[in-house]
């Protein structure tokens, strides 16, 4: 009863014409963003003849749910799915842990040349990724890592400049007094990082996890260069080889592609709250 009275006592928000324009623009933008996904779904549920029908029909006459089963059988889908999942999880773990350690060192520890190292990290973001492609290829082949996952996994454990920068910027929003209070009680730097700062920096860490998993899951160039054996392929390579002898069955391809993007959609769906908090805090710290 009291809750009902409190709800009745609260004044209702008055919407202006600016609010209506904002809602209309957001609705149009959301439709534009969702349209490719909905179009993929309709093609995945059509027969191959309906895909090329002119004029196109928005909804299939009969739902072809078997396309999701047949589409995964056309290529070695589930083995490459497991390969990609393993690589993505290990790379995400390596990038996030190493970047958190590097970011903590650059943000909190005082040592000679700290500003120089931070400038080098930020400056490395300006370099395109293919600059070191040839020397890295020679180094990995000389180590005997060709046709293996090691050239993809091992570099993930040596930090990521973008994630380290994000963590440094986020730590600027956390007062140093928390560190000092823990150290007065005898806490080590590792304890301060893992027990004090990491729980407080959970939004930016979730942001790093989402970005890292998406990058590892979608990476195509490195597996294409280093992996030759089809049994070791990632799902991105398998999807790129998805074509018939004379034509591509686009309904089967779209069905398999929807399963391919499903892990990323689920990860962002469950982590979007922390994702927005993390980016918002980093942006506010950058403006200071």
Image (cartoon, rainbow, N blue to C red):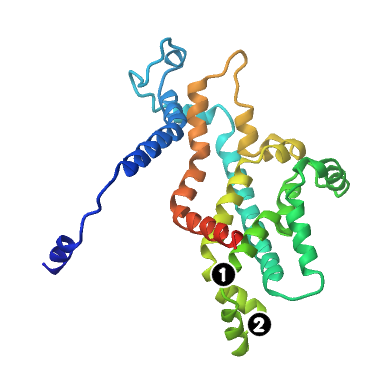
Q: Is 184 placed above or below 10 here?
A: below
Question: Residue 224: x and y, percent?
Answer: 72, 35
**Secondary structure state at the residue bearing disc 2:** loop
Residue appearing at x 33%, y 18% in the figure: 61
Is any atom of residue 165 visible in this view? yes
Name which of mark 2 and mark 1 comes first in the sequence: 2
Tell me the quarter of the picture where residue 164 sits. bottom right
Question: Residue 206: x and y, percent?
Answer: 53, 58
Q: Is 58 placed above or below 119 here?
A: above
Question: Residue 193: x and y, percent?
Answer: 61, 74
| Number of the label disc, if any, that sits on residue 198 | 1
Residue tagged 2: 188
Residue appearing at x 65%, y 53% in the figure: 91
Residue sitting nearer the eye, 45 or 75: 45
Point out the residue furthest to the left here.
1
**Secondary structure state at the residue bearing disc 1:** helix
Tell me the quarter of the picture where residue 44 sits. top left
Question: Residue 199: x and y, percent?
Answer: 52, 70
Q: Is 107 placed above or below 16 here?
A: below
How crowded pointer 1 is (Cα within 10 Å; few <14, some 14-19, many 20+) is rated as some
Residue sitting nearer the eye, 9 or 145: 9
Q: Is residue 21 left or right of residue 140?
A: left
Residue sitting nearer the eye, 43 or 247: 43
């Amino acid at each position: 009863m009291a809750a009902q009275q409190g709800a009745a006592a609260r004044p209702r928000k008055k919407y202006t014409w600016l609010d209506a324009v904002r809602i209309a623009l957001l609705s149009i933008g959301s439709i534009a963003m969702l349209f490719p996904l909905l179009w993929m779904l309709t093609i995945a549920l059509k027969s191959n003849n309906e895909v090329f029908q002119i004029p196109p029909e928005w909804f299939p006459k009969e739902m072809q749910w078997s396309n999701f089963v047949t589409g995964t059988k056309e290529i070695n889908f589930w083995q490459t799915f497991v390969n990609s999942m393993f690589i993505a999880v290990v790379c995400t773990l390596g990038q996030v842990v190493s970047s958190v350690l590097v970011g903590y060192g650059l943000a909190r520890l005082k040592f000679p040349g700290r500003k120089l190292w931070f400038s080098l990290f930020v400056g490395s973001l300006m370099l395109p990724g293919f600059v070191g492609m040839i020397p890295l290829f020679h180094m990995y082949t000389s180590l005997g890592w060709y046709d293996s996952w090691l050239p993809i996994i091992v570099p993930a454990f040596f930090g990521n400049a973008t994630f380290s920068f994000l963590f440094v910027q986020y730590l600027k929003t956390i007062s140093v007094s928390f560190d000092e209070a823990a150290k007065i009680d005898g806490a080590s730097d590792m304890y301060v990082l893992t027990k004090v700062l990491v729980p407080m920096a959970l939004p930016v860490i979730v942001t790093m996890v989402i970005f890292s998993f998406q990058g590892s899951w979608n990476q195509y160039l490195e597996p294409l260069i280093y992996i030759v054996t089809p049994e070791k392929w990632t799902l991105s390579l398998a999807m790129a080889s998805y074509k018939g002898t004379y034509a591509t069955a686009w309904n089967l391809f779209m069905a398999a592609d929807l399963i391919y993007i499903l892990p990323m959609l689920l990860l962002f769906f469950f982590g979007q709250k922390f994702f927005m908090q993390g980016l918002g805090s980093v942006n506010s710290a950058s403006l200071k």
